[in-house]
Image (cartoon, rainbow, N blue to C red):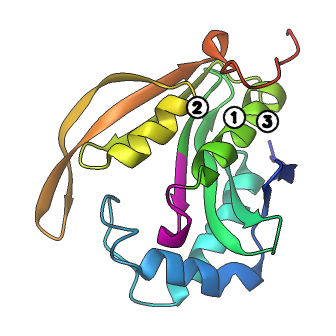
Amino acid sequence: MTLTTPTLHTPRLRLRPFTGADRDHLFVLHADARVMRYWDSPPWTERARAERFVAACRRMADEGTGVRVAVDRVSDGAFVGWCGLVEWNPVHRSASLGYCFGEAMWGRGYATEAVRALLRWAFGTLDLNRVQAEADTRNPASARVLEKAGFVREGTLREDCVVDGEVSDSWVYGLLRREWPPSDDAPLPDH
């Protein structure tokens, strides 16, 4: 089943399918060591990684396994980051959430706003029952994004990542359809 990558709008953001024009923005974002500090892979060193990322986004949608969307600021069209749902399983009605935002965009609520918009689409359009996410235990800001979006911390994956010889733990978060929406979001239609 092919998934149509959505274009979604919030008061401050537009979430849209990636295009080839996003390659430079993606490379700058993923080459930044501070942005990638808590990821499960080191910063990018070659620009071709951005092209492969965009191609992987298209392939996921074509194969029906997930979607990733670029996130732009409405006021000036600036690329602020991306978020996505991967490992979509229509049988179990589940998916995994991920996101990445530029350091200049941290602390402004953009990640929470984008995640909420994507979750509204996912619970409404994909009829998900569960969305899972992980956050490095050294990254309390990412944990706050998930908690503000309604996620519940369910456990810890001990020493689940080793990047450049550095071992780290991850918190596992889950959000169930019956727990959605957070109080400041519009309700979803009943299914």
Please tell me whether residue 135 is drawn above or below residue 186 in the rendered image: below
Which residue is found at the position 24% from the left and 48% from the top?
138
Front residue (pair 178, 88) = 178
Q: Residues in magenta?
A: 98-107
Quarter placement of the N terminus: top right
Task: Give, as a three-letter code, the residue at label 3.
Answer: Trp
Asked whether residue 132 appears in the rendered view, the answer is no
The C terminus: image quadrant: top right
Other-residue count near label 3 (Cα within 10 Å), few / some / many at <14 / 14–19 / ≥20:
some
- Give the crowd class for mark 1: few <14, some 14-19, many >=20 residues within 10 Å: many
Residue shown at 36%/31% (left/top)?
172
Residue 143 inside the magenta-drawn segment: no
Q: Nearer the viewer, mark 1 or mark 2?
A: 2
Q: Residue at x 72, y 24 (%)?
A: 184
Mark 2 secondary-structure assignment: loop
- Locate residue 52, reporting x and y percent: 58, 77
> Total label count?
3
Q: Secondary structure at mark 1?
A: helix
User: Which mark, residue 119?
Assistant: 1
In the image, residue 28 above or below residue 175: below
> Which residue is labeled 2 in the image?
149
| Residue on which the image places disc 3 | 121
Left or right side of 150 for 38: left
Q: Are marks 3 and 1 in contact (CB under 8 Å)?
A: yes
Please state if 171 lies on the left or on the right of 61 as rendered.
left
Mark 1 in CB contact with mark 2 (< 8 angstroms): yes
Q: Amino acid at mark 2?
A: Ala
Residue nearer the viewer, 14 or 189: 14
Q: Amino acid at mark 1?
A: Leu
Residue 105 part of the magenta segment: yes
Spatial CA span between label 3 and label 1: 5 Å
**Which residue is found at the position 71% from the left and 51% from the top?**
63
